[in-house]
Image (spheres, helix red, strand yellow):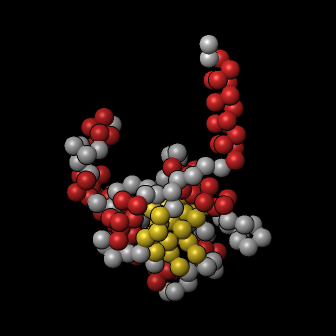
Amino acid sequence: VFVSGEPKIPGHRYRVVQMAKALPRKEFAVSILNVAQVAELLHEIAECDLVWVWRAGMSPEIRLLLAAHRQGRFKLVYDLDDLMFLPELGVPEEIDAIRSQNLAQSDVQSHYGSVRQVLLEADRCTASTDHLASEIRRWFKPATVIPNGFDQSTLKAARLAAHERKSQSP
């Protein structure tokens, strides 16, 4: 089961959808959920072998998921593609969106702290870069790098765009 903490942002496609699609269907029964679906589907989630959580902070639903995990029901992998588990980085000098989107610094730092809480509960972490995996390991969590990739439809679109651009050049 893949649980997406931010299903409406582009990273969801790279870190959740494409990861799920990469698993062979003959060997894996895969489901993709958002955090809001966890409570209603917890019994089904608890029956699986692995739960992959991407970018979810602590919430009532994640608390339920973590309680099931603590009961030894499944392995938990936490995936990140940003340093959003370091609250000290949640400042306008580091994150322009705090200023440009008029976000409260305290809210960003609180969210980053809640992301860290979930990360620390995981059996293993995955990250999009070596640097990010290294930062996760500083918290004594095993971390594996799985870079962002692309699927066949993205490759096809990129090739088509390159071909069109080339054909329009003088």
Judged from this view, the residue extending furthest toward the top is 170
Give the image location of residue 123, x and y in percent.
Answer: 46, 78
Residue drawn where x is 69% and y is 44% of the image: 153
Q: Is residue 40 above or below residue 48?
A: above
Q: Which quadrant does the N terminus fall into? A: bottom right
Q: Is residue 23 visible?
A: yes
Give the image location of residue 126, x and y in percent.
Answer: 47, 66
Residue drawn where x is 39% and y is 65% of the image: 133
Residue drawn where x is 46% and y is 57% of the image: 128
Give the image location of residue 105, x and y in percent.
Answer: 24, 48
Q: Is residue 7 above or below residue 51?
A: above
Q: Is residue 123 left or right of residue 107?
A: right
Q: Is residue 124 left or right of residue 16?
A: left
Q: Is residue 7 above or below residue 165?
A: below
- Give the quarter of the image for residue 119: bottom left
- Give the quarter of the image for residue 40: bottom right
Residue drawn where x is 71% and y is 70% of the image: 29
Q: Is residue 55 visible?
A: no
